[in-house]
Image (cartoon, grey):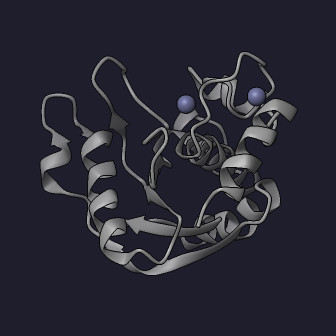
């Protein structure tokens, strides 16, 4: 699977590099590169009342970009803004299940957001976990009932921290089959 990492708005470069290096370690037969172009966060995605960004609209912007590029099997949008989707107070990410595009938000992955001290290792591990989870969805994986599997639903950062950055055997097999069917 060829994954392109798409920066949307301002994003810390070390996070993008951590994704580029980390994703091929989790998914079989996968390469990853950071796309040079940077998208701006669409103005229309900002919800004044909530003071948050609508993740579905940002995801759609990334999808439109990916459809034009066609260099990658999957495009992972990365945004550092507080995102929500209708029915949820906030989201760590969103993806087409299955589909070509996923989005993760870094906003609530930073330890500082929870008044903890800055910790780059923890921050990048959380980022990687969310990226693996959303890319898993693009491969058709649903939420997994096993609480340690990366495809388990995260209600909060505590769930994210509890999960391992690994697919359980069943999810891994499903991901490997989906990847082997990519052309
Ligand atoms: Zn999910
Ligand atoms: Zn699983």
Q: Is residue 24 left or right of residue 94?
A: right
- Picture quarter with the N terminus: bottom right
Residue 173, compared with residue 41, is above or below; it is above
Quadrant for ligand 1? top right
The residue at the point 30 percent across, 74 percent down is 68
Q: Is residue 108 left or right of residue 89?
A: right
Q: Can residue 123 be seen in this snapshot?
A: no
Q: Quadrant of residue 40?
A: bottom left
Q: Quadrant of residue 67?
A: bottom left
The residue at the point 76 percent across, 34 percent down is 171
The residue at the point 75 percent across, 62 percent down is 22
Nearer-the-camera pick, 53 or 60: 60
Number of disc labels: 0
Nearer-the-camera pick, 7 or 69: 69
Residue 108, compared with residue 178, is above or below; it is above
Q: Is residue 163 left or right of residue 81?
A: right
- Picture quarter with the C terminus: bottom right
Nearer-the-camera pick, 157 or 174: 174
Q: How far across and how far down the image is residue 38, in percent?
A: 36, 75
The residue at the point 61 percent across, 23 percent down is 153
Q: Residue furthest right?
A: 169
Nearer-the-camera pick, 2 or 156: 2
């Amino acid at each position: 699977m060829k994954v392109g990492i798409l920066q949307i708005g301002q994003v810390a470069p070390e996070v993008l590099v951590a994704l580029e290096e980390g994703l091929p370690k989790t998914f079989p037969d996968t390469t990853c590169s950071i796309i040079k172009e940077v998208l701006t966060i669409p103005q229309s995605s900002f919800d004044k009342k909530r003071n948050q960004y609508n993740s579905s609209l940002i995801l759609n912007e990334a999808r439109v970009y990916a459809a034009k590029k066609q260099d990658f099997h999957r495009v992972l949008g990365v945004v550092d803004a507080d995102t929500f989707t209708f029915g949820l107070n906030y989201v760590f990410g969103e993806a087409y299940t299955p589909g070509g595009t996923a989005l993760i938000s870094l906003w609530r992955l930073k330890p500082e957001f929870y008044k903890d001290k800055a910790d780059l290792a923890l921050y990048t591990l959380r980022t990687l976990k969310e990226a693996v989870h959303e890319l898993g969805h693009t491969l058709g994986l649903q939420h997994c009932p096993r609480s340690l599997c990366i495809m388990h639903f995260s209600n909060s950062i505590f769930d994210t921290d509890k999960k391992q950055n690994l697919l359980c055997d069943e999810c891994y097999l499903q991901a490997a089959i989906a990847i082997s069917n990519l052309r």
